Image (spheres, rainbow, N blue to C red):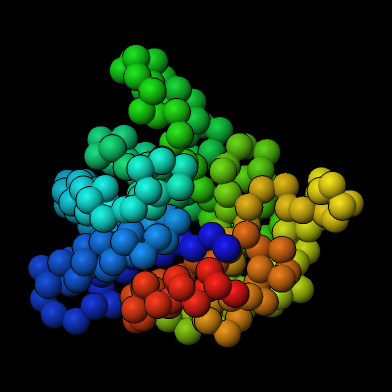
Amino acid sequence: MLLYYITDRSQFPGTPEEQQQAALSKIGEAARAGVDFIQLREKNLSGRALESLAREAVETVRKNSRPSDVKTRTRLLINSRVDVALATGADGVHLSSMDLPASEVRAIIGKTAAQDSGEVYRDFVVASSCHSAEDVAQAYAHGADFVVFGPVFEKVMPPARSGVGISVLRDVCITPESPKNVEGVPVPRLPVLALGGITLQNARECVAAGAAGIAAIRLFQENDVSELVRVLKAR
């Protein structure tokens, strides 16, 4: 089960400075616990402030992440801002439905890699937010590494949204075009992570429906992440 922590420093108590430090502390906690991906999703920051926070977040993840292999250690993605991700050495970017398609981001990364003559961008991760089967199909066509789909269950934090339900998640994960494994069982064309109202109780239900994992804000920010990961990975 892939685990994807989405940050929201505004949910922490205290002054803006205390909230930011709490978010960085939670990022370090998540990296130590072995969370697969962390999305720095702080939309209300200026470009300069986001870049500064992203540099601290990258350093925090590098310092606390356990495995040295880039494909197995915790990876930090920056919400929407490809430029900030490249400038800070983040592991990738998370694209909303209003952002550039993944294929255009790949082109930017390719040009940047060619200019820098380095391998640092070879494993750059591009994830996409999706809210419908059509969104998932587009993300797949444009070469996204994985998608975050939701809301699956009711989303109570503003803006509140009704969940689409497990049956829709299942249909998004497994389509008539889905490839089959050696046992002949259909598998998703690309990994789909379930988002929206995710709890310890329904996370396994999402995976049973075909999701590769779960994504959440409050589930990680309001719990001991090490214990949370232990319980989720053991199921």
107 versus 75 height, above or below: above
Q: Give the residue at x 21% y 66%.
A: 25
Front one among 56 and 204: 204
Corner quadrant of residue 174: bottom right
Q: Give the residue at x 28% y 77%.
A: 11
Can you say which quadrant of the picture contains the C terminus? bottom right
229 versus 129 height, above or below: below
Q: Give the residue at x 87% y 52%.
A: 183
Left or right: 32 as drawn, with respect to 217:
left
Q: Please say whether residue 199 is visible from this viewpoint.
A: yes
Left or right: 233 as drawn, with respect to 131:
left
Front one among 45 and 94: 94
Give coordinates of residue 165: x percent, y percent.
69, 77
Q: Give the residue at x 57% y 63%.
A: 1
Left or right: 227 as drawn, with respect to 89:
right
142 versus 183 height, above or below: above
Give coordinates of residue 94: x percent, y percent.
45, 49
Give coordinates of residue 112: x percent, y percent.
36, 22
Give coordinates of residue 196: x percent, y percent.
53, 74
Q: Please say whether residue 46 is visible from this viewpoint.
A: no
Front one among 43 and 172: 172
Number of numbered labels in the structure image: 0
114 versus 206 height, above or below: above
Left or right: 21 as drawn, with respect to 202:
left
